[in-house]
Amino acid sequence: MKQISTFGSSSYRISDLQLLRNSDDDAVIAKLLAHCPIMLLDADEAIAESNRARLYILLRGALWVASDTRSGMADGTISKILPGESVGEQSVLDEEANLSTTTALEESEVLVVEADIVWQLIDQSNVLARNLLRLLSFRIRAANAQLRRRQKLGEFYRQLSMIDGLTGLYNRAWLNDLLPTMVATAHGSNAPLALIMIDLDHFKKFNDAHGHLAGDEALRAAAQVLSGALRPTDFAVRYGGEEMMVLLPDTSDKVAASVAERLCERMRQAKVFTDMRLPLPHITASLGVSVLRPQQSEHDLIATADAALYRAKELGRDQVAA
Ligand SMILES: Nc1nc2c(ncn2[C@@H]2O[C@H](COP(=O)(O)OP(=O)(O)OP(=O)(O)O)[C@@H](O)[C@H]2O)c(=O)[nH]1
């Protein structure tokens, strides 16, 4: 980056500088800018000392600005600066270091205006203050819009991270997040909350006999049984391996037991195919039911359903225990 002239001795005009356009007192501005240096940047060259609070106005060429590279907070935002546009106005106004990195995309000429000159321009001609306010207000709107987009994207990924990839059911992370709230709500409103733990029977044998991919198909089929049989207010979760769980808000022991029976029956009838569309033997599941008792935590609720599931296995599998 080397100085090639000053604004006063160059052929550039004030109307070339967006921030100073529409001034009614060009003579005052021209006088203040007269000694400001014009620097030449080669392609790919970064502005030296671009962290200093100064205004850089591009006269020719193109620049790109990478956000907050020095603070290690770079978020990948890159803006292209075209002739007439400026960089660094905010750091002049708040007297903070400019944390972005500015690099020339091609050979470029840049007018460098030191902070004290910017303040004199603001004092002596209101055009800069007016244009700066406009520019900052535009940037605030753009930043807000970007934040909203990122928030939406973040929420999308958060929800995605709560879904089990194989079955499409909620996963353990979702359960850890939501079950404590569901339990607190049930206690607070005195409404029953039922939980059914479901474990596929002899699934190891199924995998061994038909292969892991067929096992995955069986898990998907089981998940479809669950999601197809529940009310919109119920939730189906893949608890781990071949263990799944159903949460039934506002559901008594009797109703939960009949839902579990229905699930057990539908599981028995579910068809599992290989990827060659060949039917595989039917799967069965054992189910354990529990309903939240006063003072019980979410861990107690799960442990009770687990114990019931164990009894269903002990009693011969393919059945419900409560
Ligand atoms: N294909 C497939 N298998 C899985 C997955 N997760 C767990 N498994 C298998 O599920 C089987 C569970 O076996 P076990 O815990 O011994 O239970 P089981 O054979 O179903 O026997 P019981 O529960 O007593 O009826 C293991 O062989 C695991 O490898 C998965 O995502 N895909």
Image (cartoon, rainbow, N blue to C red):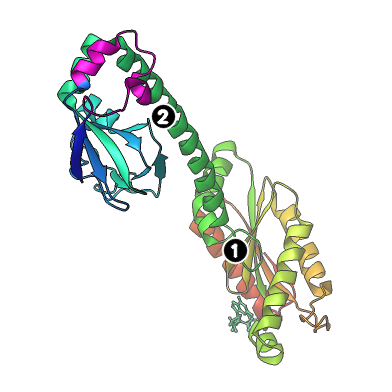
- Which mark, by number, is residue 164? 1
Query: Where is residue 162 drawn, in percent x and y?
Result: 55, 56
Q: Tell me where residue 226 sits by quadrant.
A: bottom right
SS assignment at label 1: loop
* Tag nearer the camera, 2 or 1: 2
Residue at mark 2:
139
Outermost residue toward the top in this view: 24
Q: Is residue 22 magenta?
A: yes
Residue 122 horizontal side relative to residue 272, left or right: left
Tell me the magenta residue range.
Answer: 7-32
Horizontal and vertical percent for residue 255? 75, 53
Residue 85 or residue 253, whichever sits in front: 85
As drawn, 69 above or below 161: above
Q: What element does badge 2 sit on?
A: helix
* Residue 247 in picture, x, y percent from top left: 64, 54
In the shown orientation, is residue 20 left or right of residue 293? Answer: left
Report whether residue 179 is seen.
no
Left or right of residue 44: residue 237: right
